[in-house]
């Protein structure tokens, strides 16, 4: 069963397209990474999924329902941590937590206490006195303690120091392995999410450029280095080449349909790519051309 | 358990607690003190205080509009919307609770004004005030309903847009009260003379309307991309 299904979503901002024909499918129990450069449309896509924005074209469903029509019973199973979230500056964290918890029948007070200790939160402090990282930790604690079935995180590691970021990623791994929480994680720091996700969608200029299981993508997308012209010609014949670069007499091909059978007769080395390299193989040139920041 | 948790009474109770918790603790005491203080704000010794009794109603209206903007409009503002809009709430019940909460406060402040008039704070006299300006009694109610309606439907833009004719109406009312009202006599409890010339009040009114117009235009882009906006 798919928890999230988005088809050909389009949303304009003052006449400019925020997302353009965006497709997304998040099966139950999967951890989907929504990855793209800054300004590629990730946050807009999340807001459309949650019903915070209404698409100009296309359709999105959560558990098969229009997100604008979700009943509170269903919405209480969704936890969302936005990139930028605020509460009244005078409100103490304890008060904010009490307010939040009152809306969730499945609120787990013991888990909240454990996370407060884990994230080193001082609950008697007013919200307005917290740093960005502390605010982020507070909202992550709220999101996890509400016991969600669907956890949506927009740039979750932003503003966190290295120690807390590691602790947070460990927490996500626990949620994935023990509770089978479905997650949608948007990020442009790919090394962070690679440990956690099992599905990936690349978003570029508001459009989904690739969506599949991460393992399958890693099997398909490889870098092959050849030094002879004959091998380079065979490469062009047999593989779908996403990009190629000549470095010191060696031609590097980023291929998206790798299969060991196709390497017969080609004298080359096959390199496995990490998520960031795969992302660059698909989007690097376009992103650089657009002058976007990776 | 879930059915009980989402029953109408539980949801309304939760929404009322939500409004109570997101209201700063000082709001009610400050509102109480300033409402009583407003009896003295335009105190002209030697003259009738009919005019003074209008000011508490105007102050209460402004106080409640600001409170509603602070409590309910964050649902439409980007950083705070992320928190508030995703809470599992039913919009109709949230609105119902907000009506009870704010009209309850109107009731409280109107009683406070009644007590102030009864105590003749600032020399106020209830009879001529209510006879000359009964609209002032409903002003806070209209202000609350208008603000809630506009926030629900079009965000900050509508609040400011609607406040334009609202402000104009207020000024027309005040100007007509000053210049078209009966002359000062025993019959109207020695209503104060024409204290402010039109040359002063007209630019003030135009300046306020222009200021609201600028705010209205600047807020326009915000509301177009606001939460759940179907436009």
Image (spheres, rainbow, N blue to C red):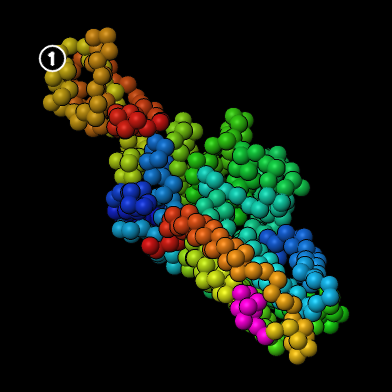
Where residue A225 appears, as percent x and y from the top left, is 26, 17
Mark 1 lies on a secondary structure that is helix
Left or right: B128 in relation to B2: right
Left or right: B125 in relation to A225: right
View extreme (bottom): residue: B187
Left or right: B85 in relation to B115: left
Residue A55, by quadrant, is bottom left
Left or right: A113 in relation to B221: right
View extreme (right): residue: B119
- For the point 54% across and 37% down, which residue is it? A157
Where residue B229 appears, as percent x and y from the top left, is 43, 62
Would you say residue A176 sits in the magenta stretch?
Answer: no
Residue B188, by quadrant, is bottom right
- For the point 75% across and 75% down, which residue is it? B52
Q: In the rendered structure, the residue with mark 1 lies on which chain?
A: A
Q: Quadrant of the N terminus of chain A?
A: bottom left
Where residue B104 appears, as percent x and y from the top left, is 70, 76
Can you see residue B17?
A: no
Front in this rendered view, residue A287 or A189: A287
Q: Quadrant of the C terminus of chain A?
A: top left
Would you say residue B180 sits in the magenta stretch?
Answer: yes
Relative to residue B179, is residue A90 depicted above or below?
above
- Circle 1 is placed at which residue position? A230
Tell me where the magenta segment starts and ends, as one range: B174-182
- For the point 67% across and 85% down, which residue is it? B182
Relative to residue A184, is residue B124 depicted above or below?
below
Please tell me how crowded label 1 is: few (under 14), some (14-19), or many (20+) other residues with Cα within 10 Å: few
């Amino acid at each position: 069963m798919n928890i999230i299904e988005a088809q050909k979503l389009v949303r304009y901002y003052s006449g400019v397209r925020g997302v353009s024909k965006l497709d997304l499918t998040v099966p139950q129990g999967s951890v989907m990474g929504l990855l793209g450069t800054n300004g590629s449309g990730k946050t807009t896509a999340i807001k459309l999924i949650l019903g915070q924005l209404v698409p100009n074209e296309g359709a999105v469903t959560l558990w098969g329902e229009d997100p604008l029509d979700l009943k509170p019973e269903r919405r209480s199973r969704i936890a969302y941590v936005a990139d930028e979230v605020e509460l009244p500056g005078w409100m103490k964290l304890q008060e904010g937590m009490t307010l939040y918890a009152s809306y969730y029948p499945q609120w787990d007070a013991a888990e909240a206490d454990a996370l407060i200790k884990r994230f080193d939160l001082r609950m008697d402090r007013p919200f307005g006195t917290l740093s960005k990282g502390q605010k982020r930790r507070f909202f992550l604690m709220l999101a996890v303690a509400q016991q969600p079935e669907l956890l949506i995180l927009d740039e979750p590691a932003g503003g966190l120091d290295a120690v807390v970021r590691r602790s947070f990623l460990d927490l996500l791994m626990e949620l994935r392995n023990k509770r089978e929480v479905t997650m949608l994680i948007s990020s442009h720091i790919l090394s962070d999410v690679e440990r956690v996700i099992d599905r990936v969608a690349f978003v570029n200029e508001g459009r989904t450029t690739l969506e599949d299981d991460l393992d399958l993508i890693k099997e398909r997308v490889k870098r092959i280095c050849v030094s002879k012209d004959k091998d380079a010609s065979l490469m062009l014949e047999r593989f779908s080449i996403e990009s190629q670069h000549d470095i010191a007499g060696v031609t590097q091909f980023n291929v998206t349909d790798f299969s060991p059978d196709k390497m017969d007769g080609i004298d080359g080395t096959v390199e496995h790519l990490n998520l960031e390299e795969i992302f660059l193989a698909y989007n690097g040139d376009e992103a650089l051309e657009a002058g976007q920041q990776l | 358990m879930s059915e009980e948790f989402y029953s109408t009474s539980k949801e309304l109770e939760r929404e009322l607690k939500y409004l109570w918790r997101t209201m700063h603790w000082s709001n009610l005491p400050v509102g109480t003190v300033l409402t009583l203080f407003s009896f003295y704000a335009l105190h002209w010794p030697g003259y009738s205080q009919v005019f003074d009794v209008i000011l508490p109603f105007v102050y209460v209206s402004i106080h409640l509009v600001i409170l509603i903007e602070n409590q309910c409009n964050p649902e439409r503002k980007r950083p705070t919307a992320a928190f508030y809009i995703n809470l599992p709430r039913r919009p109709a019940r949230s609105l119902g609770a907000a009506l009870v909460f704010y009209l309850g406060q109107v009731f409280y402040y109107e009683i406070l004004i009644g007590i102030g008039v009864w105590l003749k704070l600032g020399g106020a006299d209830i009879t001529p005030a209510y006879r000359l300006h009964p609209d002032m009694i409903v002003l806070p109610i209209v202000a609350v309903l208008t603000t809630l309606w506009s926030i629900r439907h079009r965000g900050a833009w509508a609040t400011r847009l609607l406040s334009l004719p609202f402000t104009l109406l207020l000024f027309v009312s005040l100007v007509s009260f000053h210049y078209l009202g009966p002359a000062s006599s025993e019959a109207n409890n020695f209503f104060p003379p024409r204290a402010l010339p039109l040359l002063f009040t007209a630019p003030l009114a135009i300046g306020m309307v222009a200021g609201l117009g600028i705010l209205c235009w600047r807020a326009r882009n915000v509301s177009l991309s606001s939460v759940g906006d179907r436009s």
